[in-house]
Amino acid sequence: MRTRAEIEKNENKLLAPYAMRASESWGRQFSEPEHTSRTCFQRDRDRIVHCEAFRKLEYKTQVFIVFENDYYRTRLTHTLEVAQLARSIGRNLCLNEDLIEAVALAHDLGHSPFGHAGEEALNQRLKEKQIKDGFNHNQRSFDIVTKFEKRYPQFDGLNLTVEVLVGILKHETLYDRIGQTSVGGDRGFAKKLKDRVCPLEAQVVDKADSLAYLNHDIDDGLTSGCITPDDLKDSVLWCRAVESIKRPGLNATDPIFKYQVVRALIDMQVRDLLEATSSRVDGKGLVSLDDLVKKVGKGIVDFSDKMAREREILQAILFEKVYHHWRVERMTSKARRILNELFDVYLDNPKQLPYDVYDRSRRYSEKELYGVICNYIAAMTDRAALDEYKRLFEPYKKV
């Protein structure tokens, strides 16, 4: 049996000089004794998998509402795809896979029900009352793992390592707004962490996230009928992927066409990412992460300029054809309406909120009440939000 010390010794032999090593971790907010057989990043991963917010991802929307079809991605399946892609990329770059997996599994914990439509609805409600930065799922992910998850008697939250917390706070993709805050966490601690260098492992998760949602949204879009292969022909990247899988008898009507072309798309993008990233760091004589940032700068883990442009074109097609398809617009409008009406009901009479959410003996300011309601709704799954809506409005309304 290998001990933690032996695992850490192997990391020193196998990892790149700019990779994060468990033995050199920046530590935790609250000091804890080390485990005998698991590194600090392995323990972080395990804590995340066992937390309530992670389990709820199974019933939270990615693009298509969970109950529209059993095939479509949920936040949970998306998270697992991100973790798989990120670990594969990290392994090729000789980075710390345990840290990568922990950041990947935590990166979407803060999402509200109904995907980005739900986040936009809650953000708008908070902005109504000049609550400075509205609602942001990155900050809420941080709040969940530092405050809202209560599993240990010594502290609130999961007490994850600083590296994982920095990865959560600095997570950045097309949808993310860095530097915003939500309601309820330790703002002072979060501010300190934002001055930290972002580990390459966290940068890998960002790119794996963008890879996952671009390619699985194509898959789900084709399955839903919101797009057809013809809709994607203006994308050079799509056409190159189609060309790479050509063989006699395989065409767009074949059931396996979709799977093969998405596989080819992912493979081309991962290859480009690995080659472009390696070209930025090879031959630099690097000795540490700080040295890497000084010599290379930001955007170390990234695609080539050519691939980035091709991805932007494909993403633009998806925005037009999928994310703004009339069926998706109808789903997202319905989602916003449900969350807004739930918000109004609680605001009108907050005593409808559970005792552990709304303290009857306390006097809340209006902004504090908005924050309480926002956090309560954000913690719901799609199914819980729909059930609550039915309980509060039926028989007067039908969902």
Image (cartoon, helix red, strand yellow):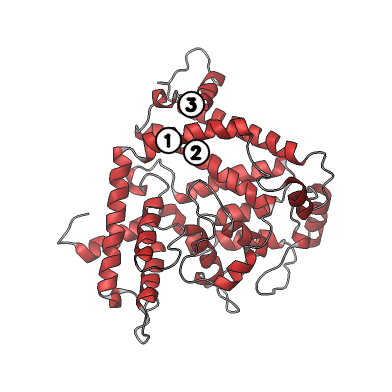
| Residue ID at (66%, 64%) | 162
Residue 91, horizontal then vertical, whole percent: 70, 43
The disc, 3 or 2, on the residue closer to the chain's N-terminal end is: 2
The residue pinned by badge 1 equals: 318
| Residue ID at (74%, 59%) | 22
Disc 2 and disc 1: Cα gap in Å?
A: 8 Å
Foreground of the two, 212 or 47: 212
Residue 216, horizontal then vertical, whole percent: 48, 38
The residue pinned by badge 3 equals: 235
Residue sitting farthest toward the top:
248
Residue 213, horizontal then vertical, whole percent: 49, 42
The secondary element bearing badge 2 is classed as helix
Q: What's the mark number on residue 17?
A: none
The disc, 2 or 1, on the residue closer to the chain's N-terminal end is: 2
Quadrant of the rendered image containing residue 330: top left
The secondary element bearing badge 3 is classed as loop
